[in-house]
Image (cartoon, coloured by chain):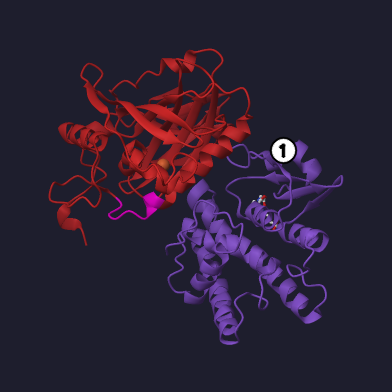
Chain colours: A red, B purple
Amino acid sequence: MTPDTFTRSQWYAIGRLPDFEGAEAKPVRLLSQDLTVSDAAGVLSVNDADGRSLLTQIRYGHLWTTLSDTPRPLYDMPEFDEPDRRLVTVGGVGVRCSGLRCVENFLDMAHFPFVHTDILGVEEHPSVESYDVSMDAEKDEIWATKCKFFQPMASAAASGGQMTEYKYRVPHPYSTILYKTCPIREDVWDLVGLFIQPVEEDECIVHSFILVFDEENTDTGLLHFQQNIFLQDRMILENQVPRKLPLDPRWELPTRADASSIAYRRWLKANELQWGVALFNEAA
Amino acid sequence: MKLFDYVLSGNCYKIRLLLDFLELSHEKQAVDFFPGREHKSDAFLQINPLGQIPVLEDDGAYIRDAQAILVYLASRYDPTGTWWPVNDPSELGRVAQWLAFADSITSTASAARLHDVLGYDLDVAQARAGAHKLFRILDDHLANQELQGFNWIAGSNPTVADVACFPYVALAGDGGIELFYYPAIQRWIRRFVNLPRFKLMPGINIFN
Ligand SMILES: N[C@@H](CCC(=O)N[C@@H](CS)C(=O)NCC(=O)O)C(=O)O
Ligand SMILES: [Fe+2]
């Protein structure tokens, strides 16, 4: 299947800047297409298999490209310009499932106690309290707010359990950002996000970042914390069947779909997204 | 005592496991193995010219190679003398034999995992095929041990051979290697995760 218009019109992160230092036609795969990245004296360029040069931009610590000549603008994260914040780019991790499934899993707090036991949740506090979901119509993005969850170790800087408040944002079919209570500063949020590079309909590379206030941990300590958590998710993601996102209403959802997941699926449907979606008939 | 450690490394996990089993207090120095390739930096090459983790620092000396570190820790700090059974030469021979086998698991099963998870450029089909060959041998061996009433690789109690073989066998699924065909390996994994003070690492599916 060729990517639908909504999927095609997006910008995609394809790696961190240092990953392309001195690159000479380094192969990268995006939306089932072979691309190459080259570094000419610090200027990065991306070409498709026919040698056509693609649009690029450098933002949020990553190189972004698009197959479209008229892409939808990349969403803003003004927090990247705030002083004192620490940015850690976690590196691309390959996952054998649709990137859409990674977004959905990221939004689902119910998995914390069972997948991230004793870090992001405890088995004694499994319940997800209700939260608000809204559409920002102007920016065409989803926000889930007032999410609360008891966390024994909400971040590398946490010194004990706390009720953590969350906001989730989905500004892009393959990106999601979570804003969580900063354990060491009042009235600010720490950011954790995923920039997903869809490789095939059922395969992706997840580039994640953290942008936090933290005076205690080294960058490498933050990196280890985040990679450990993401590898816990990876195993769960790879065990999901089918590997693409089941959007067809005829699917019986194996889990209770929660409000943010319903909003995400609705939004994908409203935008007529088809690439990466499992069709009921092709299910074995 | 300080371990130069990377959370996603199965070889570092070997050391973390034994440090916990022996209840040895230690500090960890986090190494940015991925994406930073800190193990290939000039500073790290001073510590280990092979550019590999794990490395253990104890009493001012650096020891590299996971199997060597396991032997060192067990001989020096295991009062029971069971993890590295120096008093039983034939068991000790078997333990040493399976330590070498563990390093072959690293070059196959671990390579497949590096390819699939961290995008390393290598021949993944060859790595998986190599792992399957070794897992067949290990599965037959474990089944044989069970027939003789032994639950562990070298005999009736766990040794550093089990610790050295466990991580990349248990993490094989990360690299697209199914453990479905190896029932004796699955039973051994279940026994291993039930050892006192065992800690799970992400990627290990104990429900398999
Ligand atoms: N024989 C060594 C192998 C260690 C090893 O392969 N470590 C990996 C990380 S888990 C590494 O540092 N690889 C980098 C390289 O070999 O260049 C041991 O058992 O410690
Ligand atoms: Fe998760």
Magenta stretch holds residue B171: no
Would you say B136 lies left or right of A71 here? right
The vertical placement of A267 against A95, above or below, is: above
> Over which residues does the magenta segment extend?
A236-243
Given the current orientation, which residue lies at the most extreme right position?
B60
| Foreground residue among A51 and A263 | A263
| Foreground residue among A20 and B163 | B163
Q: Position of residue A275 (x, y in %)?
A: 24, 42
Residue type indicated by callout 1: Ser
Q: Residue at x 76, y 68 (%)?
A: B84
Given the current orientation, which residue lies at the most extreme bottom position?
B148
User: Is disc 1 placed on a helix, strand or loop?
Assistant: loop
Report in which chain the residue with disc 1 lies. Answer: B
Q: Residue at x 74, y 45 (%)?
A: B26
Would you say A43 lies left or right of B91 here? left
Would you say A171 lies left or right of A223 here? left
Q: Please give the residue where the numbered disc 1 appears in the rendered image.
A: B41
Q: Residue at x 40, y 19 (%)?
A: A77
User: Which quarter of the figure has residue A73?
Assistant: top left
> Which quadrant is the C terminus of chain A positioned in?
bottom left
Ligand 2 image-quadrant field: top left
Instruction: Work out whether residue B32 can be spotted.
Output: yes
Q: Position of residue A116 (x, y in %)?
A: 45, 44
Q: How many marks?
A: 1
